[in-house]
Image (tube, rainbow, N blue to C red):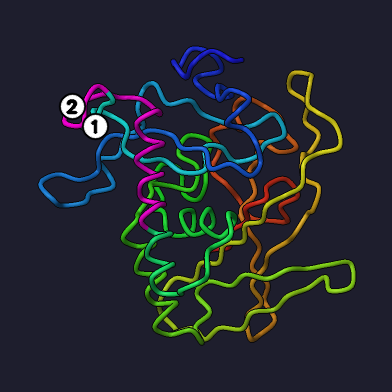
Amino acid sequence: VNPPGDGQYKSGFDTISYAATAKNVLTVGSVADAVTSGARDVSKASVSYFSSWGPTDDGRIKPDVVANGDGLYSSLSATDSTYGTYSGTSMATPNACGSTALLLQQYKQLFPGQAMRAATIKDLLIHTADDIGNPGPDYKTGWGLVNVKAAADLVQDHASFPTKQRITENQISTSITTRTVNFVWDGTSPIRATLCWTDPVGATATTGEDDRTARLKNNLNLKIIAPNSSEYLPYVMPFVGTWTQASMDTAATTGVNNTDNVEQVRI
């Protein structure tokens, strides 16, 4: 287990312990509160000094998202009426988990008898997160700050206007290797598409340090094709392939992602 993200070891990078580097979990980092007197200002969501950073040894993006875990006033276990203020990723994670529970409840109310897949709820949180830190994903704040209102609005929009296909769940196979989803652009709004899937366990456990072998079993690829046939590819991290400490803090670029089981295209 690596030391905590104290800014000394590898300048704070590569400090997430093994349990939080798994492919299919939602790993949550901590930031300061972005809300003051009811007003949200994401510029205030500075990364907490104790929040560990990625990357994983094979260059996957971790943490996945960040949430407020800095000086959080919350319930305690002593009695039913005990509260206190604490800081830690152990506060940021239940913060994000509570938001997730509300989204699952909302979805159940809007779509009785249905439930989102694990990959879908993870995708929803990542897709609607507010980008902070380096443009695009990074190894300090992942895909950004959880924005549960944006996520809830998207679910509501999906229910109100199903032809928009705001949320699409599907499968591919050896015989069906491509899925196409058409959408209409309004000509002005930014475009964002996020793909997430639950990837099977690898053939062997990771035992060595800094093993750069990709952990993916199923390597799906996302792209957006414009009416003029121009193609837009997802984010990739410069650390993958260079494997230098300096590249851990380099802004994401775009290309074919052969590393992550979360892919996102922004236009």
State left or right for residue 163 relative to residue 83. right
Q: Residue at x 18, y 27 (%)?
A: 82
State left or right for residue 68 relative to residue 176. left
Element under disc 2:
loop
| 70 in the magenta segment | no
Q: Which residue is mark 1?
A: 75
Q: Residues within 10 Å of mark 2 (few under 14, many from 20)?
A: few
Number of disc labels: 2
The one of 180 and 161 positioned closer to us in this rendering? 161
Q: Contact, CB < 8 Å: mark 2 with mark 1?
A: yes
Q: Residues within 10 Å of mark 1 (few under 14, many from 20)?
A: few
Q: Is residue 104 above or below residue 9?
A: below
Q: Which residue is mark 2?
A: 82
| 95 in the magenta segment | yes
Position in image of residue 36 (x %, y %): 14, 44
Q: Amino acid at mark 2?
A: Thr
Q: Residue at x 37, y 35 (%)?
A: 92
